[in-house]
Image: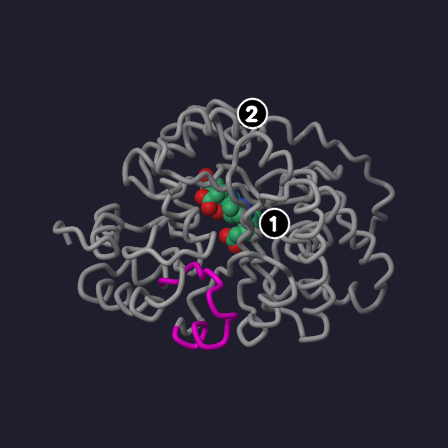
Amino acid sequence: MNPKPLLRVLAGERVDAPPMWLMRQAGRYLPEYRALRAEKGGFLELVSDSEAAAEVTLQPIRRFGFDGAILFSDILVVPHALGQDLWFEAGEGPRLAPRLVDHALESLTAAPERLDPVYGTVSRVAAALSPQVTFLGFAGSPWTNATYMVAGQGSRDQSETRRMAYGDPAAFQAIIDAIVAMTIDYLAKQIEAGVEAVQLFDSWAGSLSPSQFERWVIAPNAAIVAGLRARCPQARIIGFPKGAGGKLAAYARETGVDAIGLDETVDPAWAHRELPAGMPVQGNLDPLALIAGGDELRTAATRVVDALRDRPHIFNLGHGIQQDTPIAHVEQLIAIVRGTPAA
Ligand code: CP3
């Protein structure tokens, strides 16, 4: 039997205390992360330094003993590898240039070697992880990455990208196709370097109408799943179309992913009824309940575990852990989910 509970669940097995990890589990709520980030000078410096990125990946595993370790990197390394410049404005967020709202994709020169440090991180972490911990890689989904590539930064409603998808669907399709091809290669190389499953983050999937969702979320993710399986037949893939709501069941049926990540706005009991029988589900505690702690946290976490008791379940948050989350609350959550006495 595979000794890794998280991989067993991804293969469709139901296990008693759900295996757990937290999105953004390596990050600014951890003092050891802030210290290493300050030493290296910034977030992108950390990501491109394989030794430091491996250390950051392992920090939450050492501290909390999670069942899954997620590669420390960022989804925007793929736009960077497609030839855009990438930087972070202090206190604001990511920037990409030139913006594809006014520059043709053909003006970019792809630089896939920019991804090489990530594979170095993967092989270091794979060599260091203990046998019960599952190693997860990831990439951004094409739609979400495209919203940053087109606008050159994050935006509240992805309006410029949605306009381009309607106004010039051929040009937009070419951007999506370029992301799909780079992402297949990137995920295959992560798997070849040692990750055991991958997650596709589609943070802005919720901004699309149903027909646009079919075209720009479901179709490209299905293409990634098919392309990745052609290269790595053993690939285990978690899809996380944040905000998809009622479109989750179509996403689950049509993309070919092995498992579905739920954001915190989805009722897990609804998901259990609507998603294909036996399909593993990941999620979906509200990150703000984790900040609250105490009885609120106990009630919210128990509700998630109980709702998904009858299907393969990986416990997680519905979105990334926030920077002001008390470490003691993470410890409390682990005890609640695992049913260990410290709770
Ligand atoms: O889950 C993990 O711990 C793995 C690492 C990871 C990061 N970003 C590290 C990170 C993952 C999976 C991501 C995904 C990501 N990055 C998404 C999709 C998921 C989501 O959260 O919606 C998006 C949209 C991005 C782009 C991005 N990167 C944004 C909008 C930001 C925030 C900017 C800011 O200053 O907070 C980042 C930065 C980022 N990515 C941080 C981390 C730990 C914070 C870096 C820091 O300042 O130390």
Between 87 and 149, the one nearer to me in the picture: 149
- Rate crowding at label 1 as few (under 14), some (14 to 19) or many (20 or more) other CA atoms within 10 Å: many
Q: Secondary structure at mark 1?
A: strand
Which residue is located at x 62 percent, y 40 percent? 187
Q: Quadrant of residue 169?
A: bottom right
- Rate crowding at label 2 as few (under 14), some (14 to 19) or many (20 or more) other CA atoms within 10 Å: some
Q: In the displayed structure, would residue 139 be above or below residue 118?
A: below
Which residue is located at x 17 percent, y 51 percent? 340
Q: Provide residue 131's location: percent of width, then percent of height.
A: 36, 33
Horizontally, residue 93 falls left or right of residue 334, namely right
Q: In the displayed structure, would residue 62 be above or below residue 310?
A: above
Q: Which residues are magenta?
A: 269-285
- The N terminus: image quadrant: top left
Q: Which residue is mark 1?
A: 140
Q: Provide residue 168's location: percent of width, then percent of height.
A: 85, 63
User: Which amino acid type corresponds to the residue marked 1 in the rendered image?
Assistant: Gly
Between 254 and 199, the one nearer to me in the picture: 254
Horizontally, residue 148 falls left or right of residue 331, namely right
- The C terminus: image quadrant: bottom left
| Res. 92 visible in picture | no
Q: Which residue is mark 2?
A: 120
